[in-house]
Image (cartoon, rainbow, N blue to C red):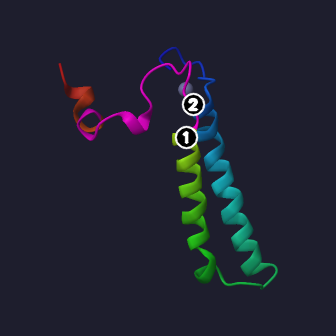
Amino acid sequence: MADGSVCGCAACRVRAVCWPVMLIAAGSLLSLDLVWHAWPIWKTWPVLLIVWGVCRLAERLAPDTGHGGARPAQVSLEQRLYGPFQE
Ligand SMILES: [Zn+2]
């Protein structure tokens, strides 16, 4: 939000949790390879894509009631690219 406060809607909370979940998944896969020697990372890395997709899906399905501003996924590409430069 513009005033620096954190939005508390469900969609923003899910988005805030996604990156830590991705890091935990990456660390788990690396430990499976390097510590436990169970599965090599080059065989398990697609799990990260699945985790990322589940995060994106959860973010889209979460209600954004009370969200301040447009959701990033709903902002058009033109607005992302040229928004700061439009008059
Ligand atoms: Zn929000």
Label 2 SS:
loop
Horizontally, residue 80 falls left or right of residue 34, namely left
The amino acid at mark 1 is Leu
Which amino acid does the dot numbered 2 rest on? Pro
**Going by the picture, which residue comes out furthest to the left?**
87
Q: In the displayed structure, does residue 3 sit left or right of residue 70?
A: right
Q: What residue lies at 69% left-to-right and 62% top-to-bottom?
A: 25
- Is 79 left, or right, of 8 in this rendering? left
Q: Please tell me how crowded label 2 is: few (under 14), some (14-19), or many (20+) other residues with Cα within 10 Å.
A: few
Q: Position of residue 41 (x, y in %)?
A: 64, 79
- Viewer-proximal residue among 51 and 30: 51
Quadrant location, ligand no. 1: top right
Q: Position of residue 70 (x, y in %)?
A: 42, 26
Which type of secondary structure does the marked residue at label 1 adopt?
A: helix
Task: Please name the residue that numbered disc 2 is placed on.
Answer: 63
Q: Residue at x 59, y 18 (%)?
A: 5
Residue 86 place in picture, x, y as percent: 19, 24
Residue at image position (71%, 58%) is: 24
Residue occupied by mark 1: 61
Is 35 situated left or right of 40 in this image? right
Query: Which quadrant holds the C terminus?
Result: top left
Q: Which residues are magenta?
A: 62-79
Predominant secondary structure in magenta? Answer: loop
Figure quadrant of residue 74: top left
Q: Please tell me which residue is depicted at 61% across the width and 59% down the height of the picture.
A: 51
Crowd around label 1: few <14 · some 14–19 · many ≥20 (10 Å): few
